Amino acid sequence: MQSAIVLALGISLMACSEAAPQRDPEQVKIELAALERRLIAAVQRKDIDALNEIWDDQYFGTGPNGATVTKTDLMTAVKDNVIQIDAIEPDDLKVRLFGDVAVMTGKAVVRAKVVEEDYSSNVRGTGIFVNRGGKWKIAGVHVGPDTFGTKTETTK
C-alpha cells in the first residue's frame, strides 16, 4: 500500500493545476508542470494546507498492485513521514479537457523513500482532475509500471 501511495502521488504531481482561464490543453500542461513543483515542495515541507487544496476531498487512486488510496491516506502518509519525495520527473504528458474535467496521461520517473527505504520507479498513469471553484483538483489516478517498449525475459 505504501508504494501505491508514492506512485499515486507521483502521477498526481504530473497533473495538478491552478485555475485555467483558457482551457487550452497546451496551456494546462504548462500550468501542471508549475504546480508539480509546488506539490513536491508541499510534500517535502509537510504543508498540509497546500496539499488539502490540491487533492479533491473525493480523491481515489489505484496503484500498480491494485491497492487503493484516498485523500486521507495520502495526507496521513505525508504527516507521518511514511513517504518522502526526492523528485518526480514527468514526460510525454497529454491532456484532454471535458468541460470541468481534465484527463492527463503520461509517464514519470519517481525517486522517493517509503518507510525510510529508497524507492525508485518508472511509471505510466492516468490522472482525472476536476475544476472546482476555478481551481483544478486531483480527483483520481491510476498508475502502473512503465514497461512499454521493454522486453521481458521468459523462463524455460
Image: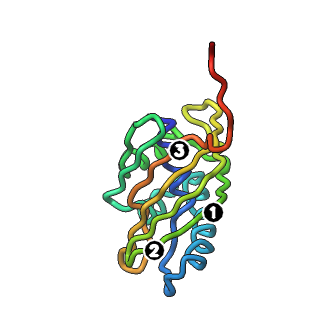
Q: Residues within 10 Å of mark 1 (few under 14, many from 20)?
A: some
| Residue 139 place in picture, x, y as percent | 38, 60
> In the image, which disc is placed on residue 7?
3
Which corner quadrant holds the N terminus? top left
Foreground: disc 3 or disc 1? 3
Foreground: disc 3 or disc 2: 2
Marks counted in the figure total 3
- SS for callout 1: helix
Which badge, 3 or 2, comes first in the chain's sequence? 3
- The percent coordinates of residue 155 (x first, y second) are 62, 16
Query: What residue is rendered at 67% in x and 54% in y?
Result: 89
Residue 97 position (above or below residue 1) = below
Judging depth in this view, the residue of 133 and 143 nearest the camera is 143
The mark nearer the N terminus, 3 or 1, is 3
Disc 1 residue type? Arg
3D distance between C-alphas at marks 2 and 1? 22 Å
Distance between mark 3 and mark 2 Cα atoms: 23 Å
Picture coordinates of residue 48, whole percent (x, y): 46, 57
> Which amino acid type is shown beneath numbered disc 2?
Leu
Spatial CA span between label 3 and label 1? 16 Å
Q: Residue furthest bottom?
A: 21
Image position of 154 with respect to 130: above or below:
above
Q: Quadrant of residue 25?
A: bottom right
> Label for residue 97?
2
Residue 37: image tag: 1
